[in-house]
């Protein structure tokens, strides 16, 4: 069951009420609820998709899979140009894990899911995301997880279906891969949700502790 | 006639200026140095904002400020052309004074250079929790001469940079993930497999306990009052205190739920007939 909250107008001001919390913003600013990837940035900025079962990709080949990523509800104050997160309605319980070792690794939001080889139905709290896995290595690639920087990950909307930015995973050799955020929506014709604008630089993560 | 009068005034002003030219140039040199250093430090602060930690920006600004003021002062002294005092002589004298000050302020200079090395090496940053010589607290400022640490009780400790640079310092915040271990005892009558299963289930429900590496609970040794167990759980460096402060309560709660009594030392006394 989703927690109760209200976004309303009082005179010309937008008001957000959730339990004892009441936030009012003056005219010129408004409060909007928009989907946000389910993770707590105060713990980590990395998101990890853990495949169950693993995905196997033949040497020199590429495959495309869909996954459903968890979405919370973000409450934002906006002037229609920039967005500031003021509250998060958590839909999914969160778990975190360590990728790599304690001196050089990263903590990531752990999301275990199965991969679909065809487009599937997703609900309003899931972002359908296309992942392209390109195996440039000389052996059969086993992909158990993909980790990326959630700060750079944009969400899109298409006829009430929310989708994520398309992700590419280049498996270079055993134990080494590069994850790239492509700046393209997973579903063609989708409109960008402007809370995370597209970034033309960055958005790459080197997975040097294996996939 | 009036024009001649005004020309005379201008001539007088010019004569005054010529007479005090050196002093005016010296003052101007210092003023220009102050303005330049302020503008430069402002540019440094703005350019490096969000690119470097605040204490690094502050210390670079201070250094640039001191260097420019020193250059301004050197130019001013040169412009003054004090009779009998040559600029080269002043430099030699300055060098000599520098050696004397250097010897007298050896500790201060040592702290200064240690401060610079701490900024370069960055063994800790502002906001990190460190332990130096059993002084545990959060780093609030890294200055050129000393570092300020705020203890958990709220008081401030000023540690000379020289000591911090030359001694072992534990940085609790630099680890990406940390392990917390707690030992407890379960009486012999209790099924430890059940205790392990329920405890692991409880641990996995806590968001701040990492799912990978997974938490573990295992028997360590036999004691006279029961089996000593150890629980180990990993957490992110940022959520360490959350786990540290709650893991014992989680264990106690689970043992209570299972109806496990506290494990007291026992003696069986039998009467010989």
Image (tube, coloured by chain):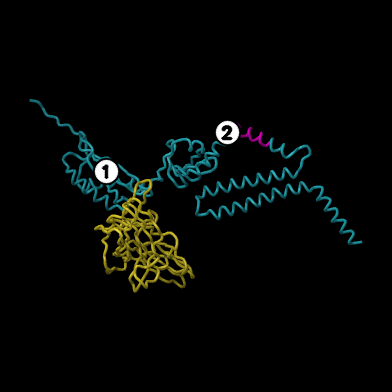
Chain colours: A yellow, B cyan
Few, some or many C-alpha atoms within 10 Å of disc 1 (few <14, some 14-19, many ≥20)? Answer: many
Image side of residue B202 versus residue A106, left or right: left
Q: Mark 1 points at which residue?
A: B231
Q: Residue A1: x, y in percent?
A: 28, 64
Quarter-wise, where is residue A73 in the image?
Answer: bottom left
Q: Mark 2 points at which residue?
A: B106
Residue extending farthest to the left is B273
Q: Residue B230: x, y in percent?
A: 26, 41
Q: Earlier in the sequence, mark 1 or mark 2?
A: 2
Q: Mark 1 lies on which chain?
A: B
Q: Does the magenta stretch include residue B105?
A: yes
Image side of residue B19 versus residue B197, left or right: right
Q: Is residue A154 magenta?
A: no
The residue positioned 60% from the left and 32% from the top of the image is B103
Residue extending farthest to the top is B273
Q: Is residue A72 above or below residue B120?
A: below
Q: Is the stretch drawn in magenta largely helix, strand or loop?
A: helix
Task: Please tell me if label 1 and label 2 are on a single chain.
Answer: yes
Q: Residue B222: x, y in percent?
A: 20, 35
Give the number of callouts.
Answer: 2
Q: Residue B169: x, y in percent?
A: 43, 38
> What range of the chain is rendered magenta?
B93-106
Image side of residue B148 versus residue B173, left or right: right
Question: For the residue labelled by badge 1, is the local secondary structure a helix, a strand or a loop?
Answer: strand
């Amino acid at each position: 069951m989703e927690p109760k909250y209200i976004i309303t107008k009082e005179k010309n001001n937008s008001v957000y009420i959730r339990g004892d919390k009441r936030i009012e913003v003056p005219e010129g600013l408004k409060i909007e609820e928009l989907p946000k990837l389910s993770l707590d940035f105060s713990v980590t900025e990395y998101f990890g998709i853990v495949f169950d079962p693993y995905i196997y990709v033949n040497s020199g080949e590429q495959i495309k899979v869909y996954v459903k990523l968890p979405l919370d509800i973000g409450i934002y104050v906006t002037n229609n140009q920039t967005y500031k997160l003021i509250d998060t309605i958590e839909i999914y319980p969160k778990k975190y894990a360590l990728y790599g070792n304690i001196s050089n690794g990263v903590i990531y939001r752990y999301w275990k899911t199965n991969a679909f080889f065809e487009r599937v139905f997703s609900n309003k709290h899931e972002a359908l995301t296309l992942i392209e896995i390109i195996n440039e290595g000389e052996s059969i690639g086993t992909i158990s997880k993909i980790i990326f920087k959630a700060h750079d990950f944009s969400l899109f909307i298409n006829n009430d279906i929310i989708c994520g930015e398309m992700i590419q995973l280049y498996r270079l050799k055993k134990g080494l891969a590069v994850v790239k955020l492509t700046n393209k929506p997973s579903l063609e014709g989708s409109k960008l949700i402007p809370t995370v604008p597209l970034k033309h630089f960055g958005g790459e993560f080197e997975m040097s502790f294996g996939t | 006639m009036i024009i001649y009068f005004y020309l005379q005034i201008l001539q007088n002003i010019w004569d005054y200026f010529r007479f005090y030219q050196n002093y005016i140039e010296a003052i101007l040199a210092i003023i220009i140095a102050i303005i330049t250093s302020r503008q430069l430090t402002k540019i440094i602060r703005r350019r490096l904002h969000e690119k470097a930690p605040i204490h690094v920006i502050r210390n670079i600004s201070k250094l640039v400020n001191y260097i420019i003021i020193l250059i301004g002062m050197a130019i001013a002294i040169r412009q003054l052309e004090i009779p009998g005092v040559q600029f080269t002589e002043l430099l030699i004298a300055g060098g000599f004074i520098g050696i004397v000050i250097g010897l007298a302020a050896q500790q201060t200079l040592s702290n200064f250079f240690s401060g610079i090395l701490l900024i370069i090496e960055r063994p800790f940053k502002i906001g990190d929790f460190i332990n130096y010589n059993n002084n545990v607290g959060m780093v609030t400022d890294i200055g050129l001469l000393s570092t300020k640490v705020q203890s958990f009780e709220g008081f401030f400790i000023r540690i000379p940079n020289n000591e911090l640079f030359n001694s072992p310092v534990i940085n609790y915040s630099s680890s990406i993930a940390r392990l917390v271990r707690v030992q407890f005892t379960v009486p012999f009558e209790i099924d430890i497999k059940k205790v392990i299963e329920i405890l692991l289930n409880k641990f996995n429900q806590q968001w701040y306990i990492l799912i990978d590496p997974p938490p573990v609970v295992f028997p360590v040794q036999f004691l006279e009052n029961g089996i000593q167990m150890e629980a180990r759980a990993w957490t992110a460096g940022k959520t360490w205190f959350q786990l540290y402060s709650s893991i014992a309560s989680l264990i106690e709660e689970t043992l209570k739920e299972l109806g496990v009594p506290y494990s007291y030392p026992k003696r069986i006394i039998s009467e010989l007939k």
